[in-house]
Amino acid sequence: MKITLPTSPIANHLENPRWPVLIAGPCSAESEEQLLDTARQLKASQRISYFRAGVWKPRTRPGSFEGMGEVALRWLQTVKAETGLPTAVEVATAEHAELALKHGVDVLWVGARSSANPFSVQEIADSLRGTDVVVLVKNPVNPDLQLWVGALERIHRAGITKLAAIHRGFSAYEQSVYRNEPVWNMAIELKTICPTLPIICDPSHISGRRSLVPLVAQKALDLNMDGLMIEVHCDPSVAKSDAEQQLLPADYAQLIFALQLREVTSSKPELRNELDSYRQQIDLLDDTIFETLSKRMAMSQKIGQYKKDNNLMVLQLNRWEDILEQRSRLAAAMGLSSEFAKRLLVLVHEESINLQTEIMNS
């Protein structure tokens, strides 16, 4: 199902239109001097579309730095007046949105915690009705695509025509190399159902540490995302929030200039023909996979009928554990990722169990 959302992309304010939208600045606005120092260095890099700063910083637990509030909006006005950079801030309430607009903020974004709450999103949307501001919506904390789409739709129905999504990764219970799991397929699925919607990646919040930011940024561009939001601080060592994931302005400039901008398709006919040939082979292999899966499920149905006729349990735990172990070894021998093999086996097993359960209850 396709969902129609605004087609107007946010401007990148860069001379070369091939460059993605680049939003950069500190996690938190801590002082006017800090903002101006960071903004001046970012402006000098000539690779920034919008200057971002957190004004209100809702933290998981009280007692930590929670932002400077309205006074920081005045600092952002000074930044904009001196550097000419458009500004962007996160808003979590209708009051935040109204104050940001009052102080001339150009871009508002709805954070991951807020986008998970339809009541909060609706209040923000209602406060923006009749304005022409750019609004970005971060994915919810948990990987719920419908919740993400719903937040975007609420903003759109308030009359906002300059709309984009931000992919900042998802919370995971298990420890990972990332602060927030990328779950790239979620962003790809959003692009599939909302093909006109720009998607910006936030490598800083996905990574959680600066060493991973370049890798995540390049991956996002390779997946044809429309921009990047990267946290940059004039001195991350003294940052009052998320110090580990913020870059120095010089490191940011180095990262941006090192990014590889790839074409959607080749301009050379012979290369396009070669790619088409590979894709045709992929299509044939996919057909074979689905034909094999269909035969596999037909066999599962026969097993389900046998279990019903002989009053046997559907779940045979020892058999399932043997399958996982043997097939994982086979996958590794074939050069496949064991994690990928496990995920695939789990999906196939779940479908087999569902089919057999239906037969048992019929």
Image: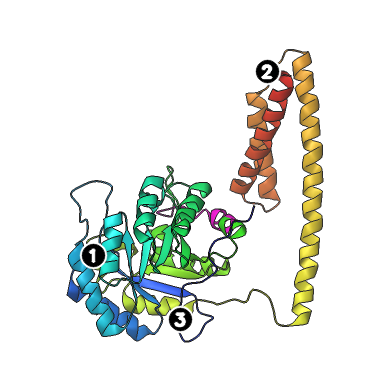
Residue 239: mark in rendering: 1
Quadrant in the picture for residue 310: top right
Residue located at (81% from left, 50% from top): 288
- Name the element at disc 3: helix
- Labels 1 and 2: the sequence-earlier one: 1
Q: Which residue is mark 3?
A: 257
Q: Please tell me which of labels 3 and 1 falls first in the chain.
A: 1
Q: Which residues are magenta?
A: 177-189
Disc 3 marks a residue whose amino acid type is: Phe
Q: Quadrant for residue 284, please give it.
A: bottom right
Q: Point out residue 82 in the picture as x, y percentages from the top left corner.
A: 25, 84
| Pointer 3 local density, CA inside 10 Å: few below 14, some 14–19, many at least 20 | few
Q: Position of residue 29 (x, y in %)?
A: 23, 67
Looking at the picture, how far across and down is residue 341, in whole percent?
64, 45
For label 2, the residue is 313
- Residue 304 within the segment the image draws in magenta: no
Q: Residue at x 78, y 36 (%)?
A: 296
- Say whether disc 2 or disc 3 marks the residue closer to the N-terminus: 3
